């Protein structure tokens, strides 16, 4: 099934599978995050070694119950943790949006 890139909110890796999340549904794919990041550099930004998120779908940063920085989205209530390494680039991306 082909999913339009504009509908993808994020990709999240879990061992050998990657979850592709849209507003309506989740899909399991086998493409590695590295190849997705290289194929769509303008659309997605890495927030953690296990996650890529859609730049247009990002709504902001918050902290979870453990005090870790997380991104939240326009379309879904999911929170995804941002690694300390990627936090400066995420802040910059959100500010410039």
Image: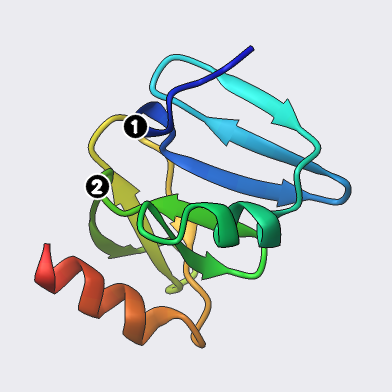
Identify the residue at image location x=49%, y=69%. 66
* Left or right of 37 on screen, residue 63: left
Q: List the single residue furthest toward the front.
A: 39
Q: Is residue 41 above or below residue 92?
A: above
Circle 2 — which element? loop
CA gap, disc 2 and disc 1: 9 Å
Task: Please give the residue where the numbered disc 2 appears in the rendered image.
Answer: 56
Q: Position of residue 58 (x, y in %)?
A: 27, 51
Q: Is residue 82 above or below residue 77?
A: below
Circle 1 — which element? helix
Q: Is residue 9 above or below residue 48?
A: above
Q: Position of residue 76 (x, y in %)?
A: 35, 31
Q: Quadrant of residue 95?
A: bottom left
Which numbered dot is residue 39?
Answer: none
Identify the residue at image location x=68%, y=62%. 34
Q: Earlier in the sequence, mark 2 or mark 1?
A: 1
Q: Is residue 7 above or below residue 13?
A: above
In which quadrant of the rendered image does the N terminus lie?
Answer: top right
The answer to whether marks 2 and 1 mark residues whose Cβ atoms lie closer than 8 Å is: yes
Q: Quadrant of residue 69?
A: bottom left
Task: Please give the residue where the numbered disc 1 appears in the rendered image.
Answer: 6
Q: Position of residue 9 (x, y in %)?
A: 41, 38
In which quadrant of the rendered image does the C terminus lie?
Answer: bottom left
* Left or right of 88 on screen, residue 66: right
Identify the residue at image location x=28%, y=63%. 62
- Disc 2 crowd rating (10 Å Cα; few below 14, some 14-19, many 20+) is some
């Amino acid at each position: 099934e082909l999913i339009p890139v504009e509908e993808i909110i994020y990709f999240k890796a879990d061992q050998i599978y990657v979850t592709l999340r849209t507003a309506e549904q989740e899909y399991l794919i086998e493409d590695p995050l590295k190849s997705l990041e290289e194929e769509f550099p303008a659309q997605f930004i890495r927030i953690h070694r296990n996650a890529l998120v859609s730049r247009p779908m990002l709504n902001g940063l918050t902290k979870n119950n453990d005090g870790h920085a997380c991104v939240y989205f326009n379309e879904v209530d999911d929170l995804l943790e941002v690694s300390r390494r990627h936090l400066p680039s995420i802040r910059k991306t959100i500010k410039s949006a």
